[in-house]
Amino acid sequence: MFKQERIYTYDGSLDGLFCVVFRAFEDKVSPSAIIPRKAGYQVPLGEILPVDTVSSNAQRVWKKIIDRSDQKNARKISVAFLSERPETDMLLWRYLNKLFTHPYGDYYKNMLDEDVYEITQTARRVRMEVHRFQGFVRFQRTRDDIYAAAIDPDNDIVQLLAPHFKGRFSDRRWLIYDTRRKYGIFYDMQQISIVALDDDSFSLTSGNIRQNARAVDEDYYRTLWQHYYDAINIKERKNDRQMRSFMPVRYWKYLPEKDR
Amino acid sequence: MKDKVLRKLNILADAAKYDVSCSSSGSSRASKGGLGNAKSAGICHSFTEDGRCISLLKILYTNHCIYDCAYCVNRRSNDRPRATFTPAELAELTVSFYRRNFIEGLFLSSGVLRNPDYTMEQLNTVVRKLRNEHRFNGYVHMKSIPGADPLLVREAGLLADRLSVNIEIPSELQLKRLAPEKDFASVYDPMNLISREMLASKEERRKYRNAPRFVPAGQSTQLIVGASPDKDYSILKLASGFYDEQKIKRVYYSGFMPVNEYDNRLPVLTAPPLRRENRLYQADWLMRFYHFRYDEILDEQHPDLEPSIDPKLAYALRNPHLYPVDLNKATHEEILRVPGIGVRSAKIIVANRRFGKITMTHLKRMGVALNRAKYFILCGELLTGTKTLYPEQIRRRLAGKKDMAGKQLSLFEAAGTDLNQDKPSSLING
Ligand code: SF4
């Protein structure tokens, strides 16, 4: 059905990607690459079509996904989209193409299909990172009693952390900030909002907030935690490889017990 | 004051580290407007240098002890620094760690100070403070102090998410030899009390939705491997009994750390038996998630797990008549028994056969350990060669190879890994 090939660019949002899918179907063109227009993006040679995000078109794709599968599967797609593994956009395209054109009603469940399997795995990996960060977030108290944390995850997951931390710390204001993607979520004891901060709010080497913004006790609790981390270790059982596989080195920089 | 707490933390965390049962899964407790909640999938907040998950603040109330158990660093005849928290200090420490997201909750154990009742009462006071004064709804695992009054144990069960009574030594004879003040009754009585109360509370809650919950995350126990001459077969038999009868959620196996070398009742070890400990966890895993009975894994003739191959592989090699398993036809149960195939893969295979033939490509993609599985399966066009290989040849090829099962296992042990401890198919924790 698809004859020509074309490179599509979009604004980097899930709605934007859905609009690419919408457009490709309309044009009967199979994308040879799908590229988000983020800072410093590069586009290979070929016929290029920038797609604007039109929310009614995105809505139609969303509705079609739910028609052809179910809410849970639609959720899975939106989670997989947050993956920053290369080629995720093309994988999503191939997957949606199959979902919309395959005659079987439940093809989306067919784990023998490579793309179906890969989408499932991709969503699984993103959720695994969310699960990891439910543990790896480290709050520091500020002078005005906000609990603030810096994170730098592989995937764009900060928003997926919101329900967990809202359920757990509903009686204080808190902030979780992605220092690489430069945005975060802030909870004011009523609701959660997306925020952007000045670049020097957190140290990019330790994740610490500025000394003059830290509550006076903060260093003490950090020390207690570091001592606890050392005391609980059993030297005779040292297993560095296992520790690193559960807690990869790239996550250490914002963990007080590892960043010393 | 701050220095005092730091010193106590150092001593009492160090003294608590040998208790391995530090997981936080299996409870869910809503926040109710106070601080915190408990998640049914355990969350690891960090990992120690020895590769274990840090989920809870694992700490002793005191490391003073009136008893003298041979295998314990805190026994009264050891000359080492001792410390005791006040309930207020410990409750505040827990909350300050929790608010910073260092921990999932508290795992509170203790040496026996003055007498068991007094000690249990102190532990209850800590948790009462947490629950009432700090309105703390996070996870709490308490040790039930052997010999404490049933009323105090009952109160603990209403405060905590999980209670544990450690059996420590797998046979009564050996237990009495190494810990003269203890016997099996001192372990089984509180265990049975806890399982009865759990049942009663479930029953109550069916009638009245607001009836109090008794240890919603169940009870666990730990036993030390290698401090006594007990065989793996009797260990698995004991564990299997705990799962069936006391409805214990988890049995933890802790390789004996060579401590108290001066005590000649203890074996002379240069290092903890980590390999054996790992094999026991694998066997335990087979009982809990692969529907093996303990006497299928070992028997009187084979009383010990083989160090060089994992227990599922050992089972397959002892039962060649059950293989090869045709993945396109076999039942879920049969597929679960194939070495190298995990719970998740078995489920995917069975659920997706209606879409087409399962081939090696699919298995590879799912992460099946083909180096082991290939000897035991028929898969699409592929006849994998079992016909020409005898169990002894397979054993020779696979013995000592790093096995995925071990890796998978530790994965789940950690993530929480125990991501979802009780359902290994769901992603961990990876
Ligand atoms: S009662 Fe517990 S703390 Fe005391 S010596 Fe025995 S094992 Fe150690």
Image (spheres, coloured by chain):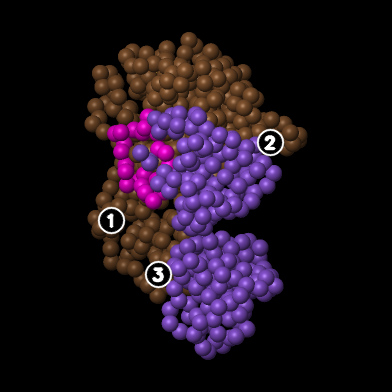
Chain colours: A purple, B brown
User: What residue appears at the point 52 percent right and 32 percent down from the top-left corner?
Assistant: A215
> Residue B319 in magenta?
no
Q: Are marks 1 and 3 on the same chain?
A: yes
Residue furthest right in the image: B208
Of labels 1 and 3, earlier in sequence is: 3
Where B86 falls versus B164 (above or below)? above
Disc 1 versus disc 3: distance between alpha carbons?
A: 20 Å
> Residue A256 in magenta?
yes
Residue denoted by label 1: B398
Where A203 falls versus B386 (above or below)? above
Residue nearest the viewer, comparing A74 with A214: A214
Where B26 falls versus B399 (above or below)? above
Disc nearest the viewer among 2 and 3: 2
Residue denoted by label 2: B33
Q: Are marks 2 and 3 on the same chain?
A: yes
Disc 2 versus disc 1: distance between alpha carbons?
A: 55 Å
Give the x, y percent position of residue B271.
Answer: 26, 33
User: What residue appears at the point 29 percent right and 21 percent down from the top-left corner?
Assistant: B260
Residue nearest the viewer, comparing B416 with A96: A96
Is disc 1 placed on a helix, strand or loop? helix
- The amino acid on which the numbered mark 2 sits, given as a three-letter code, is Gly
Is disc 2 placed on a helix, strand or loop? loop
